[in-house]
Image (spheres, rainbow, N blue to C red):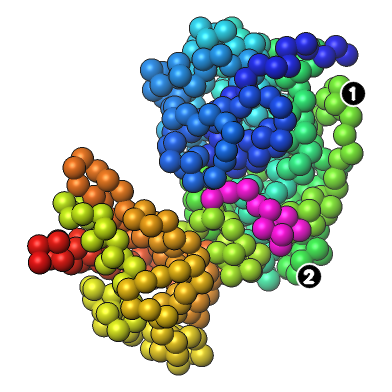
Amino acid sequence: MADSKARQGRVLVFGASGYIGTNLVERLMSSPLPLRASARNREVLAGRGWTGLDLVEADALKPETLTAALVDIDVAYYLVHSMAAGRDFARLDREAAANFGRAAAEAGVRRIVYLGGLLPSRPVSEHLRSRKETGEYLRAGGVPVTEIRAGMIVGPGSAAFEVIRDLVNHLPLMLTPRWVYSRSSPIALENLLDYLLRVPYIDETAGECYDVGGPDVLTYEEIMRQYGDVVGKRPIIVPVPVLSPRLSSYWLRLVTSVPTSIARALIEGLKQDVIADDAAIRELVPLKLLSFKESVRSTLAAESKQQVIARWVEGSIVCRNYHPEYGFYAKRASGSATTDAPAAQIWQQIISIGDKQGYYYLDSLWKIRGMIDWVFGGPSFRRHRRHPTDLRVGDVIDAWRVIAIEPESRLTLLMEMKAPGAGVLEFELKPEAQRHRVTATAYFHPAGVWGLLYWYSLTFAHLLIFRGLTRAICERAEAAANR
């Protein structure tokens, strides 16, 4: 085994706002290598609070944006996919990979590291076929590609793992298709990151594909039961022959908070065994691999210590009211409006909301919700603002608590009223073409089926209220500015 000597070149994490990308950036930040992080939206990266690295906005479906991302790059991690785009994701993934491969070759990139998926001998899932094709299109660009193929990743925020968590945490009885007998090789997030970090600096890995997995080969039934053992759940799992993975995907909206398009693609790939043949990678990169149960315990420990590296809306244990069983992924609804009022006037209206001033729009609905909360023992009507026009982190506004303030930019409120889940209300103020845009967004981490039903029942009301609320904030700011 020979280690590459080119160790000082700049590293690019392309897809740094995603699950693996975000965690990989955090690991790379502790290394001496210069680092660049790229995503479709630079503001999402800026919100991570990362320092000491380049942040670049780029989209593989827009080739003209790739030059700035790839300039002076030695190793590029390609960690993007289009599953959230719906049925057209495979075509988009092929196009993106081809664009990136060509651009990397033109930029003189030494190595591309691509994270794909474990493959059965004849994959029938479009998701699995697409992951394979993505690697092929990257290699066509001419830069040596090291492809790491993983199955279920066990870590907070992993879509496949979060589906398992939601099922076991909230369904004591499951009628499942025969896919529960399919076998896989789940791998701990920290083990996967170790592989990704080391392979680009081993010469033998150039142009090669490697399966990676943990030490356990488990059926999905065993995965669910072992997770249940760790968290104290004993689900009754009853396989039903008439339920196919496709049929199962249709009721995912009522079972898991994982985005439906992603969960459906994952479920449809469970018809076949996906077992890692990892002898080659283990010889090159010897690791202490965590068992599935050890991986679960590590995940729960990271959450309890607030070590989850993600945007707070995606899974912060704080914004789930310290309930790890609540959905990691947040459901959301928002509304916005624009105004030419000064930012200071708009901000003053935002931070004065609630309590005796009310909520500016459909205030009666806010009061009805507060009354329901009060009847069930919640804090509504039992507490009041510290100051009518000033806010600090930790202040309360009725049944909300201030958890973050960025003056004239962002106000984040944690919902403390009684509900089947945990919620956040965020106000954002941004300049936009000589005006300012005010956006109000609700994020909700549901507690299983009841939490999802609660959220869906309020979706229309949320959209109506937030559009009206932001318009009212703008109108009040304009009136204040004209006095």
Q: Is residue 126 above or below residue 374?
A: above
Q: Nearer the viewer, mark 2 or mark 1?
A: 1
Q: Is residue 302 magenta?
A: yes
Q: Main secondary structure of the magenta part?
A: loop
- What residue is rendered at 66% in x and 16% in y? 9
Q: Quadrant of residue 273?
A: top right
Q: Is residue 150 magenta?
A: no
- What residue is rendered at 59% in x and 24% in y? 12
Q: Position of residue 103 (x, y in %)?
A: 49, 13
Q: Position of residue 47 (x, y in %)?
A: 49, 46
Q: Position of residue 213 (x, y in %)?
A: 79, 36
Q: Can residue 1 be seen by looking at this rendering? A: yes
Disc marking residue 232: 2
Q: Mark 1 is on which residue type?
A: Glu
| Mark 1 neighbour density, 10 Å: few (under 14) some (14–19) many (20 or more) | few
Q: Which residues are magenta?
A: 301-311
Q: Is residue 380 above or below residue 319?
A: below
SS for dot 2: loop
Instruction: State left or right for residue 286 relative to residue 139.
Output: right
Which one is earlier in the sequence, the residue at label 2 or at label 1?
Answer: 2
Q: Are marks 2 and 1 in contact (CB under 8 Å)?
A: no
Q: Position of residue 335 (x, y in %)?
A: 29, 58
Residue ID for mark 1: 283
Q: Is residue 400 above or below residue 146?
A: below
| Mark 2 neighbour density, 10 Å: few (under 14) some (14–19) many (20 or more) | few
